[in-house]
Amino acid sequence: MLSPGSQLSRFQTPVIITVLMLLVVSCIATVSQTTQELGPFPPPKTEPPIVTPGARPGDPPSDAIVLFDGKDLSAWKSLKDGGEAKWEVKDGAMVVARGTGDVVTKQEFGDCQLHIEWATPAEVKGEGQGRGNSGVFLMGHYEVQVLDSYNNTTYFHGQAGAVYKQHAPLVNASRKPGEWQTYDIIFSKPEFDEQGKVTKRARVTVLHNGVLIQNNVEIYGETWHDRPALYIPIGTKGPLKLQDHGNPVRYRNIWVRPL
Ligand code: MG
C-alpha cells in the first residue's frame, strides 16, 4: 500500500502502468462495440419499395423496363439514320443484320441494372475479333464486349466480357457458340464539370452467366479500338447501344432498371 509521501517501488510502477493501459483498451473496446450496436444513424426514414421478382432467374422484375421481349424492335431505332431498327427478329431473338449498323434504344439511361442475353453463331466462322463480335455499349459509349470467346484467342481486354481495350474479364465464363449466355450489368454513369472535364469516372460490374467477371471497375473513357481511352463529355443519360460488327449475333430478354 502507498502511504502519503511514500515512493513507488521499482516493481509497483510497471504494474500500475499495465493496469492503466488495460483500462484504456477496455474502454475503447466498449465504446466501439456500443457504436457498432447502434448501427447507422440516423436510420432510413423511407421503406424500400416493393418489387416483385421475375418468376425465374433472369426474368424481368416488376419495376424493369423491358427493351426486348422476343416480339418486336419497337424500343429500338437505327443509330445511322434514327429510323426503324433494321435488325431481324427471328425465333424470339433480335439478330444483327450485317451492314445495317448499330441499334440504340429510344429511351435513355444513366445509372442502371441491365440484363441481356446473347448468343454467337452456332456455325463458327472467322477467328479472334472476327468471330461472333458484337457489343453492349452503356450510354452508347462504353462497350462491354460480346464475342465468341470459346476456344478463340484474342487480346485479353478484347474477349467476351471485357470493358473493351480497358479491362480483361476476371475469368472466361463463356458457353459454346450458339448457346444462350447472360450478362447482368450494374453501371454507374460518369460525371463532368461545366468545362466538360470528368469529375467522376463511370464504373461497371458484370456477371457473365452468373459469374463475376468485372468487379466495380473504373471505365477510363471511350472504349475505342485504335486510340487510348479518353472521356468526352456526354449528358446524364444515354441510350443502350448494340453493335453491328458484321456477325449475326442474337439477343433476347433485354431489360433494364434505372437506379
Ligand atoms: Mg465488339
Image: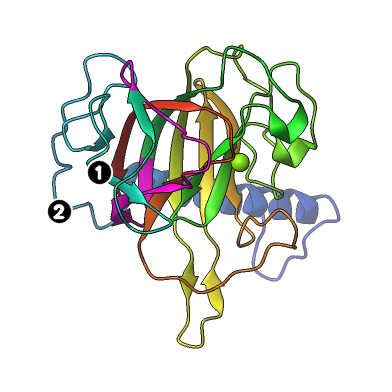
Mark 2 residue crowding within 10 angstroms, few (<14) / some (14–19) / many (20+): few
Q: Position of residue 124 (x, y in %)?
A: 66, 15
* Ligand 1 under 8 Å from disc 1 Cβ: no
**Element carrying mark 1:** loop
Query: In this figure, which residue is indicated by the disc labeled 2?
Result: 45
> What type is the residue that disc 2 sits on?
Lys
66 relative to 96 in the view: left or right: left
Tell which circle, 2 or 1, labels the residue nearer the N-terminal end.
Answer: 2
Magenta includes 97? yes
Asked whether the beta carbons under mark 2 and mark 1 sit within 8 Å of each other, the answer is no
Q: CA distance from mark 2 to mark 1?
A: 36 Å
Q: Position of residue 186 (x, y in %)?
A: 44, 42
Instruction: Name the quadrant where ligand 1 sits.
Output: top right
Q: Which residues make up the magenta segment?
A: 90-113
Amino acid under disc 1: Ala
Element at label 2: loop
